[in-house]
Image (tube, rainbow, N blue to C red):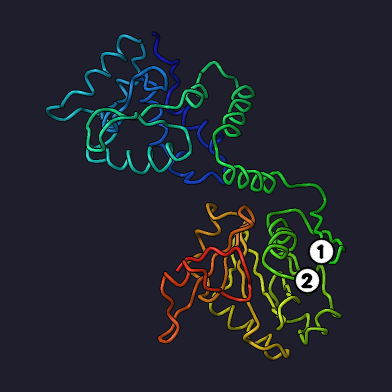
Amino acid sequence: MPLPALMPYGGIHERLPVIFPEGTPHRNNCTWEIAAKTVFVMLYVGAVEGLETWLRPDQVTRMTDAQAAQTADAVRTAWMQKSLRSSKGETPGRWYAGNTRESIRDDTIRTGLVANGAVVERQGLPTTSPAPRYALQAAFASLFDPALDDEAFRRAAESWQADNLNAGALARITIIRKGAVAGGDHVLVNFPSGETRRMAPGNSSLISKAVIEDFASTFLEKPGVIFLSESKNQVIARDETLAKAVGLNIQTDKNLPDVILVDLGPKHTLLVFVEVVATDGPVSAARKAALTALAVAAGFPEEHIAFVTAYLDRSAAPFKKTVDTIAWGSFIWFASEPRNLIRLEQGGAQSVRKISDWAQGTALTALRTRTRTYL
């Protein structure tokens, strides 16, 4: 049986980010250069589902540019057989040092490609067996056919994603794609009251829209919007009547957050300050203290205030850039995973909880349900 068609690993590297778009779990592990070279070597030796040839991670380390340029089937087969034998001495020009095979196995293959359905594992091998055990899933391997033009590849990649990525990953990808292509004149935001407001296009507006339409309806019992602004500090909505009804009196010239929500459902009204992060500006400790002082001065009790930092997606740069500055005792929420919520629990000498407390369903805060807690 002939070996699979082969494209240079540079071409594979260009296709991987399309196959694994923003929002894909462990995307970096599937799209970095070492992943491209791993896929290349699998194709080179014919380690594709159904061909009964399998790859061992150290084979990736033994490939060289000179060998990769020799693409005749007979040469590829001979190298595959040689690369599985014990090697004495150093291989000139090898792609990676021999001790990187564990990283290729654990980070690229298992965490990235296997977890996302791109690589299958040979069944029946003992865990400690040195025999080759990995192969490209057949449909995934076909995405690297050099005969595919750009449009055919794009369609094939979308079809593969629909068939192989899990529902959560597909939901994240869809939301992030909406953000990437958002344009037009405005983003239309639907308020809990039934009113609508227009915001300028962009990720900040998309996250604000998700906060009001998804976060509020999921985590608040009876939500209302007191304040909404854009990144340019333009006030989009301000509900004076609602603010006064809950005892809040904040001046518009104060340094307010992007969104102020209120939950009228609990016995004691809950005020929720939300900072939207498209690039920077989370609820830091200093920001939390300032907003708390502002609310208390405006007549709202401190024990009924919550703080949320909202992002588009946890795999994107803004979250990674700012996560270490987010205040303890606040929440983190992602528009791409709207039913999940992270609580940065702040323990003290008398208040540290045991993990068993969380596992047994101990209530977290007045933000009532569907909460995933990271201690």
- Residue indicated by mark 1: 191
Q: Splitting the image into 4 quarters, where does residue 67 fall?
A: top left
Which quarter of the image is occupied by the N terminus? top left
In the displayed structure image, the side of residue 361 where residue 265 appears, left or right: right
User: What is the x, y in percent for residue 233?
Assistant: 74, 69
Residue at image position (22%, 32%) is 130
User: What is the x, y in percent for residue 291?
Assistant: 64, 81
Residue at image position (55%, 52%) is 316
| Above or below: residue 242 compared with residue 23 | below
Q: Which of marks 1 and 2 is nearer the N terminus?
A: 1
Which quarter of the image is occupied by the C terminus? bottom left
Q: What residue type is labelled 2?
A: Val
Residue at image position (81%, 59%) is 190
Q: Splitting the image into 4 quarters, where does residue 156 fall?
A: top right
- Residue indicated by mark 2: 225
- The residue closer to the viewer here, 204 or 268, is 268
Q: What residue type is labelled 1?
A: Phe
In the displayed structure image, the side of residue 148 where residue 193 appears, left or right: right
**Can residue 249 be seen in the rendering of this structure?**
no
Residue at image position (63%, 84%) is 292
